[in-house]
């Protein structure tokens, strides 16, 4: 397509250079570039499975046009940590059984991290509110909530680590 | 899904306005958070030739208190509203709406201007802004004009904004104290849902008399509306339960809801009545 | 080796066993970390070079004749590799019967793969397009010219039964019927002091798994069609092969971690389309449903209309139940006969009812076809029988729990189909504990009212016994002492594979980290059967346990010779093998394995586990064994209802279930918590709305599942009778976790507002209308 433009997307600290048409969403672009840890659930912004951090704030990558993400730091779930060195949220989700089928998990952890970066020691209501855009069909959110709360309290300024 | 258009990503407001001015009428659309626009685009409900992304234009994203007014730039996000001390202090109704606006990711991207411009009668920020007597500034390459939000909507998904204009600023007078404003969103689930009935109220009270009453309704008419008949019942009076009940009933008569998959018109009317009464009662009790 | 399960004798409650090392511990699951860090690969995360992208063109009418379909412009579009219509598949049909049967006769329910002439539901596939990119495939879709002529359709199963109603297919609209005739209901009703009749209705429900249907297929160098797909059933390779007219060993299905199933990936979804296109193009092909494809395009939960008449004595003993069911089967049969059967078996609930009359019909309409969904008819029946129990208690003026207590089934009693239950029936304990856990009622003031509800249930685990269900599994030990498990089981998120690792770790005395599980590949993993019907732990867990025990037996025998003791004196734990009474006499597990390997002792085993095999039920009476066994439990709910707006908030949600034995309690809790959410959505916010067969809720902003803001923290109470047929006395939890939740909520709302809303979902609007009606009644009688 003649409308394609080569852009640079910085994902988890790594720069990708690739050509995309204007209508290409960030979700499509990321998965095309191999970042299949970003999941597709609805492509309408209703489910949150595709959430990534853009400059540290969670957005639905299915609602973001790829060109508009150029010049911004994109972080996916894999960018927060890996199995040998997991991020505290990843470790808590795994240990507490907050992931069942796991498909919504990347989006949930991204949304949780976005909350924790913005709010010191969020209360229970704030946690629920921050996660209400991430649909989960397996867990009922109970253990998800426990995991996020545990990390939030541990990370709280003045809290125990 | 598949759509062809050109996409501009200017860094300066003037450049964005120039693209809009040179557009072919409705075939150029501004793109802010994209939380409605991208969905409409992919569904084929809109087919612009060109989109102008405002994502790089920080000049449109700010919140300030000046000269007895609160003002914010059009690209202020819903999350920005929730972080703002000024909004928390002077516009709790807007905070009420922002809290339950979509989910976190949508709040981080969606903008105040976008919510107004999307034209949905269920747009949740509009009723609170109507209660605050907000004005919007419409800016184009040719200049700027200020329009009261109450006059902005002219019908279902029709408004005063020309295709070459952006909503660059929204502002409202800091309510004369003592006053209270509040918004309640009724929907079919508590998180991230399309509004069934939205009611915003604002009252100011001096010497036991309600000096200003504002009642704004969302999702129950072709465009968000003020229930002016109900307001008139309250202004200038000491509020009593009977008067507040009457205002609730009147507001329910004034709205023009439809039946849809979420609720019937009858239920919507009923909830306008109930919620108007409840919110005014609560505000009055707080101020009395 | 094989083992045939026999029903154990009636068992008293077991004492806690303190000797297990892995079983019963809430270990971090083997799949958890991969999911938490985004490393787990789902079926849609695989791509291949030269891959084509597939789109499905669907009918925009529910009942129509396909007059014309012209794909020539689409085929001519550059980048389009192939367009398939029914014209290219003249004699091929897709089987839709219950999956995974071995050698059993199929029902004659095969249906068209793509519409030939007759469209019977909105969204029925008309054509398949394979193109170089998704964009081109979408463009091509728009170029296919379709002419549909509407035909009269029928959209309500009650209407569809009336003479003169449009016939969806075949001779009449009744696609299945099920009876139970037990005892003498006429006599039972005559003995009753009170007869209470009510009708309950449930709605179309969507599975709403977060991962849409997706797969990738290719034909390999041996001509085998390989399909990597998100599925609950790898045994569908048989159906794919039959559809394509190729031998069964020429189709391979490779599952991946499934992003949610709940029964929605139990039928064939994208497999046949992928196989056809891979074969037609000679290239790898990938199909991922959009969310709209998924909502429109796969079978839903059967709506049921259920009319109950219950006769009771004034001291609260049930003397007779008559239950009539009408289920909307939608446009094609799929699993309707079995859903109806399960509903019939579940009809009286976990209660002793000697006189039972059930008449059920599954009726075709031009709505979307309906098929498997967690609970499988047992959930719908519970929505009726538990609401009815509350209504009867109310009519008697008796406490709701006391009324139940007077009627519970007990171990050894006979269920609806006159077959005794041998395992523990701990309904009373579950109800008492769930109810007690509600604690003090939350305080509220007008206009908010608080209400509490309980629901108990009976839900089967294991498949219908005349299907002669089996499961195979393989366990082997490597020379370094690590262990491999191979099982065809599909892991749909409840920890199916981790449970196998935990079982093997227990049997062989190693840790979870020492066990690697390879699963869900029809070419290389022994076929374990479907992950459905709450059977995976029972069947697959037993098969793997048998295999592990066989290996253990041989290793122990060799160690016993080494230690000069009898084999029953050898124990294995912490990767060591030792004499139980003299643990210093020991060797490492790895050393023992090396020893065995050097001597040619067989250190692996393929085992088969068989469920009880029975014959089909007597069609006239519906009596006989249907399932291997049942799970019993309860769910308790407290709600707050705003009587002015009708909004309902669930404040407390507590599930108490006798799972036999929890292999991993955290996984069991996870199921109870998730079931609580699905049940809450079922009761309050979820409804797939069809107008003249057209779906009006084709997205997650219209079909509303509970969010984190809607769900209270769910509390799980796990009871363990150790009386189940599964490994270590386990029963199951997958479906039971959901079954009692919606009726418990319905009962709580009725308790709060004094009137029952008998049609789900209970929306705020229905609450307001019910209260208005109540207020306008001229006489407020004792019943309100």
Image (spheres, coloured by chain):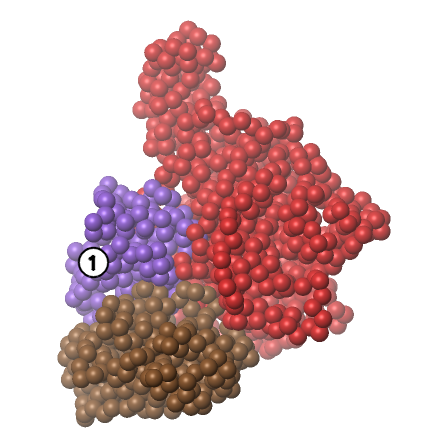
Q: Within 10 Å of the Cα at label 1, are there few (<14), some (14-19), or many (20+) other Cα atoms?
A: many
Could you tell whether A38 is left or right of B22 in the image?
right
Q: From the viewer's perspective, is residue C214 above or below residue B81? A: above
How many labels were placed on the picture?
Answer: 1
Tell me where residue A107 appears, x and y as whole percent: 33, 57
Which quadrant of the figure has residue C431? Answer: top right
The quarter of the image holding the C terminus of chain C is bottom right
State the purple chain.
A
Residue C144 horizontal/vertical position (percent): 46, 74
Q: Which residue is mark 1?
A: A11
Residue at 45%, 18% in the rendered image: C554
Q: Is residue C443 visible?
A: yes
Q: Residue at x 18, y 92 (%)?
A: B143
Q: Residue furthest top?
A: C564
| Front position in the image: C401 or B225 | C401
Residue C105 visible to the viewer: no
Residue B116: x and y in percent read 32, 81
Relative to residue C202, is residue B206 drawn left or right?
left
User: Mark 1: which secondary structure?
Assistant: strand
x, y percent for residue B239: 43, 83
Q: Is residue C543 above or below residue B276?
A: above
Q: Quadrant of residue C387?
A: bottom right
The residue at 29%/76% (across/down) is: B91
In the figure, residue B95 lies in which quadrant?
bottom left
Q: Which chain is brown?
A: B
Q: Nearer the viewer, residue C91 or A133?
A: A133
Chain depicted in red:
C
Q: Quadrant of the N terminus of chain C?
A: top right
């Amino acid at each position: 397509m003649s409308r394609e433009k080569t852009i640079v997307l910085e994902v988890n600290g790594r720069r990708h250079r690739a050509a995309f048409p204007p209508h290409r969403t960030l979700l499509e672009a990321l998965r095309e570039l191999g970042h299949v840890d970003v999941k597709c659930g609805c492509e309408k912004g209703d489910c949150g499975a595709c959430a990534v951090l853009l400059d540290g704030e969670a957005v639905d990558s299915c609602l973001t046009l790829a060109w508009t993400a150029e010049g911004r730091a994109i972080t996916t779930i894999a960018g927060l940590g890996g199995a040998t060195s997991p991020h505290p949220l990843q470790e808590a989700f795994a240990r507490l059984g907050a992931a069942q089928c796991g498909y919504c998990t990347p989006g949930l952890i991204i949304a949780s991290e976005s909350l924790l970066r913005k709010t010191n020691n969020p209360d229970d209501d704030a946690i629920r509110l921050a996660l209400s855009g991430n649909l989960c069909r397996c867990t009922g959110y109970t253990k998800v909530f426990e995991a996020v709360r545990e990390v939030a309290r541990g990370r709280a300024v003045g809290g125990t680590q | 899904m598949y759509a062809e258009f050109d996409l501009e990503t200017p860094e300066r407001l003037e450049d964005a306005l120039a693209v809009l001015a040179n557009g072919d009428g409705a075939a150029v659309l501004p793109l802010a958070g994209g939380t409605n626009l991208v969905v409409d685009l992919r569904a084929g409900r809109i087919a612009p030739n060109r989109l102008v992304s405002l994502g790089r234009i920080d000049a449109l994203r700010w919140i300030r208190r000046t000269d007895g007014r609160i003002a914010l730039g059009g690209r202020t996000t819903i999350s920005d509203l929730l972080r703002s001390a000024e909004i928390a202090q002077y516009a709790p109704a807007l905070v009420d709406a922002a809290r339950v606006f979509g989910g976190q990711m949508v709040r981080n991207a969606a903008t105040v201007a976008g919510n107004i411009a999307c034209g949905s009668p269920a747009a949740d920020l509009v009723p609170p802004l109507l209660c605050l007597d907000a004005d919007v500034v419409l800016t184009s390459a040719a200049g700027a004009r200020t329009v009261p939000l109450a006059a902005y909507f002219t019908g279902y998904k029709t408004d005063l904004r020309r295709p070459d204009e952006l909503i660059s600023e929204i502002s409202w007078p800091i309510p004369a104290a003592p006053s209270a404003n509040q918004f309640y969103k009724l929907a079919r689930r508590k998180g991230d849902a399309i509004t069934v009935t939205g009611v915003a109220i604002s009252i100011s009270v001096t010497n036991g008399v309600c000096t200003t009453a504002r009642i704004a309704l969302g999702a129950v008419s072709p465009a968000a509306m003020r229930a002016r008949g109900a307001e008139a019942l309250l202004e200038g009076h000491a509020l009593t339960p009977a008067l507040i009940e009457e205002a609730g009933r009147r507001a329910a008569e004034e709205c023009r809801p439809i039946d849809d998959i979420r609720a019937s018109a009858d239920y919507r009317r009923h909830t306008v009545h109930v919620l108007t009464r409840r919110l005014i009662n609560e505000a009055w009790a707080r101020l009395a | 080796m094989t083992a045939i399960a026999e029903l154990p004798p009636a068992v008293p409650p077991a004492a806690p066993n303190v000797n297990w090392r892995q079983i019963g511990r809430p270990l971090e699951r083997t799949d958890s970390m991969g999911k938490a860090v985004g490393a787990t690969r789902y079926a849609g995360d695989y791509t291949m070079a030269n891959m084509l992208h597939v789109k499905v063109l669907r009918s925009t009418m529910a009942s129509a004749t396909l007059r014309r379909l012209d794909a020539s412009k689409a085929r001519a579009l550059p980048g389009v590799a192939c367009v398939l219509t029914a014209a290219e598949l003249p004699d091929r049909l897709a089987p839709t019967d219950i999956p995974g049967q071995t050698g059993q006769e199929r029902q004659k329910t095969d249906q068209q793969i793509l519409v030939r002439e007759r469209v019977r539901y909105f969204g029925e596939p008309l054509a398949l397009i394979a193109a170089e990119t998704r964009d081109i495939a979408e463009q091509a879709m728009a170029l296919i010219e379709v002419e549909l002529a509407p035909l009269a359709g029928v959209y309500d199963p009650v209407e569809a039964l009336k003479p003169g109603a449009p016939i969806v297919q075949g001779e009449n609209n009744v696609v299945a019927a099920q009876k139970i005739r037990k005892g003498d209901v006429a006599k039972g009703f005559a003995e009753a002091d009170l007869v209470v009749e009510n009708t309950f209705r449930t709605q179309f429900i969507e599975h709403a798994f977060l991962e849409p249907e997706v797969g990738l297929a290719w034909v390999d160098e041996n001509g085998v069609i390989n399909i990597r797909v998100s599925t609950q059933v790898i045994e569908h390779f048989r159906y794919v092969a039959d559809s394509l007219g190729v031998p069964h060993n020429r189709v391979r299905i490779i599952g991946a971690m499934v992003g949610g199933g709940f029964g929605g990936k139990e039928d064939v979804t994208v497999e046949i389309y992928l196989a056809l296109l891979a074969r037609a193009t000679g290239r790898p092909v990938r199909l991922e449903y959009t969310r709209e494809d998924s909502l429109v395009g796969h079978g839903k939960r059967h709506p049921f209309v259920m009319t109950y008449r219950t006769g009771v004595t004034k001291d609260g003993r049930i003397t007779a139940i008559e239950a009539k069911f009408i289920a909307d089967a939608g446009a094609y049969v799929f699993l309707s006969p079995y859903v109806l059967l399960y509903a019939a078996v579940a009809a009286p609930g976990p209660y002793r009812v000697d006189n039972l009359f059930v008449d059920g019909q599954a009726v075709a309409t031009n709505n979307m076809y309906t098929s498997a969904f967690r609970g499988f008819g047992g959930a719908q029946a519970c929505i009726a029988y538990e609401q009815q129990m509350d209504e009867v208690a109310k009519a008697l003026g008796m406490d709701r729990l006391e009324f139940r207590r007077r009627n519970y089934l007990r171990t050894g009693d006979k269920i609806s189909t006159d077959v005794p239950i041998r395992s523990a029936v701990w309904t009373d304990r579950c109800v008492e504990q769930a109810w007690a856990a509600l604690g003090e009622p939350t305080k509220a003031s007008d206009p908010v009212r608080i209400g509490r509800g309980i629901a108990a249930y009976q839900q089967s685990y294991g498949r219908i016994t005349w299907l002669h269900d089996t499961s195979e599994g393989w366990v082997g030990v490597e020379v370094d002492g690590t262990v491999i498990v191979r099982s065809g089981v599909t892991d749909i998120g409840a920890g199916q594979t981790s449970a196998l690792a935990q079982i093997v770790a227990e049997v062989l005395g190693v840790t979870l980290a020492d066990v690697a599980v390879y699963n869900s590949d029809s070419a290389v993993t022994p076929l374990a059967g479907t992950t459905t019907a709450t059977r995976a732990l029972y069947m697959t867990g037993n098969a793997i346990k048998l295999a592990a025990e066989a290996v253990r037996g041989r290793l122990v025998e060799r160690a016993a010779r080494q230690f000069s003791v009898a084999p029953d004196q050898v124990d294995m734990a912490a990767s060591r093998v030792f004499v139980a009474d003299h643990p210093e006499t020991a060797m490492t597990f790895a050393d023992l394995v090396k020893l065995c390997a050097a001597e040619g002792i067989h250190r692996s085993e393929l085992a088969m586990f068989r469920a009880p095999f029975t014959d089909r039920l007597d069609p006239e009476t519906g009596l006989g064994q249907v399932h291997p066994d049942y799970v019993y439990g309860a769910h308790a709910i407290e709600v707050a209802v705003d009587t002015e707006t009708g909004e309902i908030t669930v404040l407390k949600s507590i599930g108490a279930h006798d799972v036999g034995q929890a292999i991993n309690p955290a996984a069991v809790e996870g199921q109870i918590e998730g079931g609580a959410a699905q049940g809450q959505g079922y009761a309050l916010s979820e409804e797939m709305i069809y107008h003249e067969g057209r779906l009006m809720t084709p997205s997650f902003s219209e079909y509303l599942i509970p969010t984190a803001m809607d769900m209270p923290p769910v509390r799980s109470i796990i009871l363990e009778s150790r009386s189940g047929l599964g490994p270590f006395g386990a029963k199951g939890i997958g479906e039971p976790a959901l079954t009692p939740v919606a009726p418990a909520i319905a009962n709580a709302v009725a308790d709060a507002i004094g009137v029952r809303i008998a049609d789900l979902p209970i929306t705020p609007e229905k609450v307001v209308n019910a209260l208005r009606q109540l207020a306008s009644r001229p006489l407020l009688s004792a019943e309100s």
